[in-house]
Image: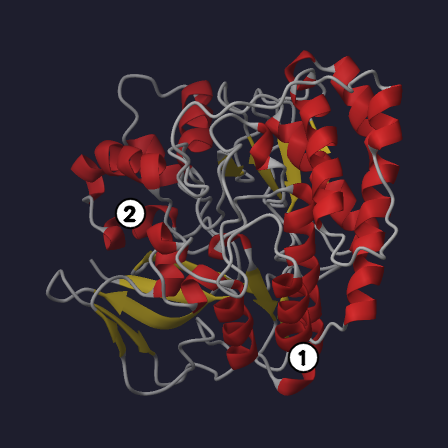
Amino acid sequence: MKLTVFVHDQPVATLDSPDNFKHVLTYYPDAPQELFASLLMPVRTESYSYPELHPLFRMNLPEGFLLSTLQEQLGPHVGASALNLLSVVGRNVIGRVKVAPVGANPKTPPLAFELKDILRGDNSEEAFVSLVWRFAASGVSGVVPKFLTPNTIGEAKRGTLATERYIVKGTTARLPGIALNEHFCMKVADRAFGYAAKTEVSDDGQALVVHRFDYLEGSDTRLGMEDLCSLLTLRPEQKYESTWERVAKRIKDVTVPAGQPLALSHLGNQLLLSYALRNADCHTKNIALLYQNRDDVRLAPVYDMLTITVYEDYCKNPPAMSVNGRSTWSPGKSLELFLQTSCGIGAQETRTRVERICEAMVDISPELVQAARNYPCFELIGPRMLHTWNEGMNSLRLKKSWSLPSLTDKITQAGWADVASPKAVATPKIGRSQLPRM
């Protein structure tokens, strides 16, 4: 199968696997230089050949449970190879690149023809919506099931209007209250630094709506987006096999000198937030770069930030990536050294940022307490989060002389002083999840 690669809906290259093993991307002779498909693949006459699917396109395929489900359901109809699956989901991805079979229109409603054609015995709109919600997702990562909502299926029975501008994230029995968990963590990130994806929670607290950030502000123009797993040429299943140092170095490699300080500054913020909020799932697929062109490459806003250690499956997990060879929630001088040498953030500025995060957590905590009283699904998780946040704040006291805000009074006022900590039910697997990844 041969596919056409589009950038801003303009065909720029073909993607093929002539021998069903190696994959070859070839730009058209007239492809504009600015319409490159990936930061790792600038426009040139020579083809780009990879033994597997190119990192950019691997990024846009689901993984784990969802990938297996797609292969099982779609394999008999379109084939189960990575290229064949990409032909189905390639028009419904994050970023400015789309992929479609040769001759197909990239603006065709995502998945409409492919999935409707294979419905078995039930061609109702409700069944179609159900399938789209189940399969129409790729290019976004994390432990929570996510769905890129297409714009052609009317109103699904999930409390939100389906539109290309949002990502809808579901919940699971293993992660109760996860939508509210992430919502409040994102509010902390936004309050502290003003650079986080905007989120909203459904009326029942069971679904999270994330406003997509891969659009140029105030327009319908898509930005290029590549996560660090792709940029480090790692397979999706290797997303934990990196370090914060490697991430920082690759950002420097693909960012022009003028843009490096801001990108690395935001990276430092994301690292501090991960420690404060105890996000043990901050891996290379949860850090990404956005760009309009090669002179405008920047770190994407914080996304997929949540206090994952309040759940039994993750409560004993260390950080997903190490700092200075250490993977611990008490990083000490290693954290300060990384921020200074890799991100250009000095000791005094580090303290200022830690204080901003702590103040944001204190400011958001009353909303968290109220949500724990209002939503049964959050009744247990909310108190655990407040305790965990307090521990995270204390772990960022990198010098004994630092005086930082505390949540101890808030915990006492809420009557949560004796909340039991989660107990691990199995050997932790460094943040890895068997949940559907979308």
Report the disc number at residue 334: none
Above/below status of 17 relative to 192: below
Name the quarter where the C terminus is drawn.
top left
Residue 64: image x %, image y %? 33, 39
Report the disc number at residue 259: 1
Image quadrant in which you'd find residue 242: bottom left
Can residue 301 be seen here? The reply is: no
135 or 249: nearer the viewer: 249
Q: Name the side, left or right, on which 221 lies relative to 35.
A: right
Q: Nearer the viewer, mark 1 or mark 2?
A: 1
Query: How does the figure colour the protein chain or chains?
Result: secondary structure
- The residue labelled by disc 2 is 85
Q: Which three-letter amino acid code belongs to the residue tagged 1?
A: Gly
Residue 300: image x %, image y %? 63, 60
Dot 1: element: helix
Above/below status of 89 relative to 149: below
Residue 213: image x %, image y %? 65, 54
Nearest to N terminus: mark 1 or mark 2: 2
Q: Which three-letter amino acid code belongs to the residue tagged 2?
A: Leu
Can residue 62 be seen here? The reply is: yes
Q: Residue at x 31, y 59 (%)?
A: 103
Dot 2: element: helix
* Separation (CA) of disc 1 from disc 2: 35 Å
Above/below status of 4 relative to 107: below
